[in-house]
Image (cartoon, helix red, strand yellow):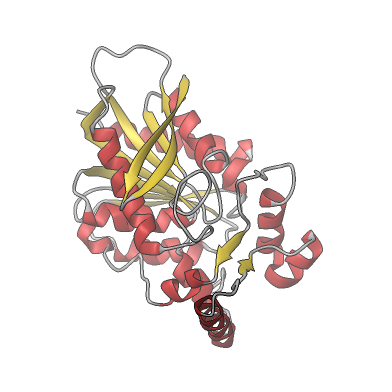
Amino acid sequence: MSRTRVSFVSAGIEIAAHLYTPGAPASVPWPALVVGHPGTGVKEQTSGTYARLMAERGFVTLAFDAAHQGESGGLPRGLEDPAQRVEDFKAAVSHLTTREEVDPGRIGLLGICASGSYSLAATAGDPRVRAVATVSTAEPARQFRFGADGAQDPAVFQALLAAAARARSTAARGEDPGVMTMFPETAEQAGALGGQHGIDGFEYYCTPRGEHERSAKFLAWESIDRMASSDAFHAIPLIGDRPLLQIIGERAVTAWMAVEAHQRATGPKELHWIEGAGHVDLYDKKRYVGPAVDKLTEYFTEHLSK
């Protein structure tokens, strides 16, 4: 297996990516996967882990940094723009179709966390995608509006919208609007704000377990009002008869979003539960990632066959 730095353009923004290729030479082009990272993540974290493991299983894989994040271009930094995130997936597919080692008729999408929802929207609008799979599906607009567990007081999001509006006015005056910090200073504080899900996120992004210098841990304030009118699940019925697999930890508080996406799908679909796993456990813990990769290999081998 080898890894190469590549780049491509998405809506005028240069996207930085890693292309993973299987070690053994192929007599014919390989099937390929675009692998998207969680919100505030980068390609060197969980998406890179899955891209590497799937390359070892015989797929060309492309893990990229979303526009405005990581090594990719785009201002302001830390912007979570749902429409751009979907466009990034489509642009990644376009890049794969130009590569001689890839069979353009055998391309799938693999989205993790936030990229799970964006990969569904991208598949819905791009018939070049043969199959789509997600791990720990989360839809950022829903998570901000309703909370990770779906039970958040509506006043919380209204307060965020008010803060985002103030930030826009501040920027209009030529002043620094600041950013929305995603994590507190300690795991205890993260638990007080978000329970075990908050602690899990802190332990991945803010400790040596998973942290990376280019994982911003913040959002540009205008991300909030862009998400207010976004619904990445709206177009799921357009996936039609192409297959959909969602892998979810049985303890994930975010599982309700994957269930909703599953209900909206009209074609072949499967919810695959990983025993004992929470949402973030599927990012990097071998005892959970291993079974997930086994299932993904089985799924994409079947649906990206000739």
The quadrant of the rendering that contains the C terminus is top left
Q: Visible in this render: residue 197?
A: yes
Q: Residue at x 74, y 66 (%)?
A: 191
Q: How many marks?
A: 0
- Residue 58: image quadrant is top left
The answer to which of 117 and 253 lies nearer the viewer is 117
Q: Is residue 192 left or right of residue 277?
A: right
Q: Is residue 235 above or below residue 174?
A: above
Q: Is residue 286 above or below residue 193?
A: above
Residue located farthest toward the front when viewing the structure as drawn: 174
Residue 48: image x %, image y %?
51, 36
Q: Is residue 190 left or right of residue 145?
A: right
Residue 266: image x %, image y %?
23, 60
Q: Visible in this render: residue 303?
A: no
Q: Is residue 72 above or below residue 118?
A: above
The answer to which of 251 and 183 lies nearer the viewer is 183
The answer to which of 168 and 123 lies nearer the viewer is 168
Q: Is residue 79 above or below residue 61?
A: below
Residue 21: image x %, image y %?
40, 23
